[in-house]
Amino acid sequence: MKAVVAGASGGIGQPLSLLLKACPLVDKLALYDVVNTPGVTADLSHISSIAQIEGYLPADDGLKKALTGADIVVIPAGIPRKPGMTRDDLFKINAGIVKGLIEGVAEHCPDAFILVISNPVNSTVPIAAEVLKKAGKFNPKKLFGVTTLDVVRAETFVQSITGEKDPAKTVIPVIGGHSGETIVPLFSLAKPAVKIPEDKLDALTNRVQFGGDEVVKAKDGAGSATLSMAYAGYRFAEKVMKAAKGESGIIEPTFMYMPGVPGGEEIAKETGCEYFSVPVELGKDGAQKAHNPIKDISEYEKKLLQACYDGLKGNITKGVEFVANPP
Ligand code: NAI
């Protein structure tokens, strides 16, 4: 298993690369960034784990060398938010970064699993899909927008109500997109079931939707979530790799092109959004089945979904347009 981190020298990239370097599923790890990869690579190379590590800068065909032979490419490249910014404010810069990296993936490792972390995920995943389509290399089952941090936050924040010692034991589907009101946590479908007092539901939901702002504010201009995101990105990457190696029964919410995933066509029709995050069953070749939880959700959650659709549709169109009519 060869893993690549593109944006490896950044706030997310470094701890994510550390976790992948320590992961026994990874045989080869290639780090790519426009700055500082030699230092990060030298540092991580002293860790006595299985993964052989290589680091590349853009010079001397660095991107090509990093991507060639890759089985999984994780992309946390791009600028993060500062206080007062929304994820959509990042579009101008990050759209071009993601486009360039995906062009490289299309050319050098089109069969790899692609995990997009760069924000705004609601638009960067459609950008990635359009670039791959243009190159005739789009496999919708292998392109994932990483929304795991929303799931991790839901698990963590609900603990104040459940009192469960290990928060990760409460499974909470989070669907929709990955920004503000497009994030829809489904506490009514928590497993094991969770009883949230009505007067606490608004605050809890809002904290999952806007939890990223807490970190942006606390970092006071120094960026957004990096360590919790590296944890979340690793957790998702590990699941994709375990499924690729044949482990069955792995289901995780992720933002995908629904018409291209078995079971997803119906979700795209019902939501009016071609890209949507739902719990997806992972297999050897990527997404095997998109699960549709919408029919089982509460009236409260149905209202949240309406607000989600409005915001998400615009974000998706913006991404598609960016590739169709480059600025
Ligand atoms: P950062 O600024 O610390 O790191 C970004 C890295 O990307 C830098 O090392 C930079 O040199 C590199 N980079 C820039 N252009 C590149 C290119 N063309 N090729 C390769 N590398 C390039 O930012 P941070 O905090 O690591 O965040 C990265 C991205 O992840 C941001 O867009 C942020 O909004 C997003 N993010 C996503 C989350 C999610 O849940 N999906 C959560 C938190 C952040």
Image: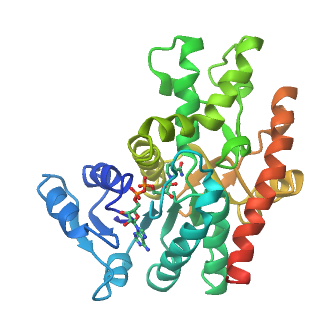
- Quadrant showing the C terminus: bottom right
- Mark yes or no: residue 92 visible: yes
- Mark yes or no: residue 249 visible: no
- Quadrant showing the N terminus: bottom left
Q: Residue placed at 43% from the left, 65% from the top?
A: 72
Q: Nearer the viewer, residue 182 or 135?
A: 182
Q: Nearer the viewer, residue 188 or 240?
A: 188
- Is 255 left, or right, of 98 in this rendering? right
Q: Residue placed at 35% from the left, 52% from the top?
A: 16
Q: Is residue 216 above or below residue 69?
A: above
Query: Which quadrant of the render holds ligand 1?
Result: bottom left
Q: Position of residue 62 (x, y in %)?
A: 31, 82
Q: Is residue 141 above or below residue 222?
A: below
Q: Position of residue 19 (x, y in %)?
A: 31, 48
Q: Position of residue 103 (x, y in %)?
A: 52, 82
Quadrant in which residue 208 is drawn: top right
Quadrant in which residue 155 is drawn: top right
Q: Nearer the viewer, residue 243 or 123?
A: 123
Q: Residue placed at 60% from the left, 81% from the top?
A: 137
Quadrant in which residue 60 is drawn: bottom left
Q: Is residue 48 above or below residue 8?
A: above
Q: Nearer the viewer, residue 53 or 98?
A: 98
Q: Residue placed at 77% from the left, 67% from the top?
A: 317
- Is 133 left, or right, of 68 in this rendering? right
